[in-house]
Amino acid sequence: MSRIITFSKALNEALQQEMEQDEKVFIIGEDVAKMGGDFGITSGIWKRWPTRAYDTALSESAIVGLSCGAAICGLRPVAEMMFADFIGVCYDQVVNNAAKLCYMYNGQASAQLVVRAVTGGGIRCAYQHSQCIEPWLMNVPGLVVVAPATPYEAKGLLVSAIRSNNPVVFLEHKGLYNTKGDVPEELYSLPLYKANVERAGRDITLVAGMTMLNFAKRAAEEMAKDGLSCEIVNPRTLLPMDGETIINSVAKTGRLVVIQEGPKFMGYGAEVGSMVYENVFEYLKAPIRRVTSLDTPVPFSPVLEDYVMPQYSDVLKACHEVMAF
Amino acid sequence: MTISKEHLLKVYEDMVLIRRFEEEVEKYSKNGTIPGFIHLGVGQEATQAGIIDVLLKTDYKFPDHRSHGAIILSSAPEDRKRIMAELFGKKTGINGGRGGSMHVNDLKVRNMGFNAIEGSIVVTGLGTAFASVYNHTQDVTAVFMGDGTLGEGTCHESINMAATWKLPLIYCVVNNQYAISTRFTESHPQPQLAMWADGYCVPNEVVDGNDIEAVIPAVERAVARARAGQGPTLIEFMTYRWQGHFSGDPAAYRPEGELERWKEKDPIKLTKARLLSEHGVKERDVQSIHARVESEISGYIQFALESPNPDPEDAVKHVYTDIEVEAR
């Protein structure tokens, strides 16, 4: 049965229901046990399973390193990075260890772990608590990077991430935690590596995930008033990315706007654009547009942060530009 | 604790096997047959043989970049030639030639391999030790590290967590005096690195790493503590590498005469002298050990030389567990 719950609650449900199913799943991180996590995502778990929830010292490398070692012994660790930015501290463990283990072991063992990482801006916390770090990870074969946009996706994709035998960095946008949506009560999973066509259309393809999906939906409504139809593709998994769904969509619409929260240069929008140019250049009716942050660190003052971050008006402008070309 | 004649003969053979393995590896590295970097453990045989001698097949081992010896001794005798083939980058290598010298692993015997960044396996080892506790097994984890490794921040994170949670982990600090060119006394304040563990309330000791009869009991004490749920131990094995950091490094940074002084403490010579003088072993018995090792090693080399190269397209296998990466 489905009911309306928050993104946070959906994540918590995924964790608890997977822990009910599989005793090899445990959670580890800073303040994830007794406190239930800085954002409350793991609340109630330690009470139910005191031997499967571990508060650690402030030691991100040890958290991910331990998770790698436990994973190759067959356990399924779910580690929390209180802020995705902290992956900078344990980057070595994520990209040089977790991502390489399956390859190094010829598939006989792998880092079957999840690093839940709280990502994104908009909460006025500046440089080290606001970044979209997905491009740091997306050039690393062996990693899986998942980015849900709705409570429904949050639950279904986290379940798949926990069950995956690959190392998954699971990006949870803090701006989505309080958003609400329809989520089935029972345990279900959504496929990894598969983009979702949120809305079918024929004039413009909008690629957008996480908080940017909302901008895309609003823009599609707005453009519809002018009789234009937007197709929205939500990548869901950023690495490996479902290029096929995006390419097929652009082959149909001939126009592409990629909306990503992080900085423009080498953001994932660049890769989406390259895939489209390489595969369906002849179908394009207009140059690709990217709506992104500016190439700066994320500043603190609301006026400054809003100036740097992509805005809804930028999305509308890009849509009009690709139509006017 | 005394070590029996039979036991000493066995570990003597182990040490000779390491020495000859390394000498051959050096030869084929220098003539260009073995690709990439090679880090040799000549002079450190007692530490490697002693640690592996104590550990069980079911214990988790993380040998480091200078641990070919520990690696071959961990594996079953029939797999050892495949370790040589791995160093040669061959298809028959124990990991299909994918990893080479710095990444040899053999999960059958819980050799978990090395991540060629210092300090990385020190935190990975937390996880295997954690799994033993989580699964209520008796398996201990032994992590090999050098004196240089202790400079990495992960060592602090690891020992802090292992000590707090009483994980069955043994930090085997093989102090061969130099991190490439930098002497440990120039980069650490402690006169003995074992003292470093005091700050974490972790039992530690300094052991003559060239004396296998000192190495074995020290490792046994640490293993007993770990299996009894008493937490980690740090052992500092004082030893010396006879070669430079990598095969081809002339090691000009070492003071004159230092190497010669350490060669007098050759762990193999030391053990042989004891076998002859204290255990009544005859020179010809020792020679027959050397002959056996010689034939072993030449078998490894022949196997490695005659083995085919990997199929290039195998490079795209096992990036992920469930999806294929595009081939060329």
Image: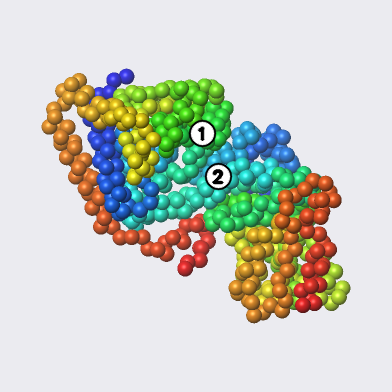
Q: Quadrant of residue B225?
A: top left
Q: Quadrant of the N terminus of chain B?
A: top left
Residue ID at (47%, 53%) = A103
Q: What amino acid type is highlighted by mark number 2?
A: Gln
Pick the front one: B298 or B24: B24
Report whether A232 appears left or right of B186.
right
Residue ID at (80%, 77%) = A324
Pick the front one: A19 or A110: A110
Question: Can you identify the residue that label 2 sits on?
Answer: A93
Question: Can you identify the residue that label 1 sits on?
Answer: B151
Q: What amino acid type is highlighted by mark number 1?
A: Gly
Pick the front one: A250 or A110: A250
Asked if B242 appears above or below A25 in the picture, the reply is above
Pick the front one: A311 or B255: B255
> The disc numbered 1 marks a residue on which chain?
B
* Residue B139, percent from left and from top: 44, 34
Mark 2 secondary-structure assignment: helix
Report whether B149 appears left or right of B71.
right
Residue A105 visible: yes
Asked if B277 appears above or below A157 in the picture, the reply is above
* Residue A181, percent from left and from top: 78, 55
**In the rendered view, how is the structure colored?**
rainbow
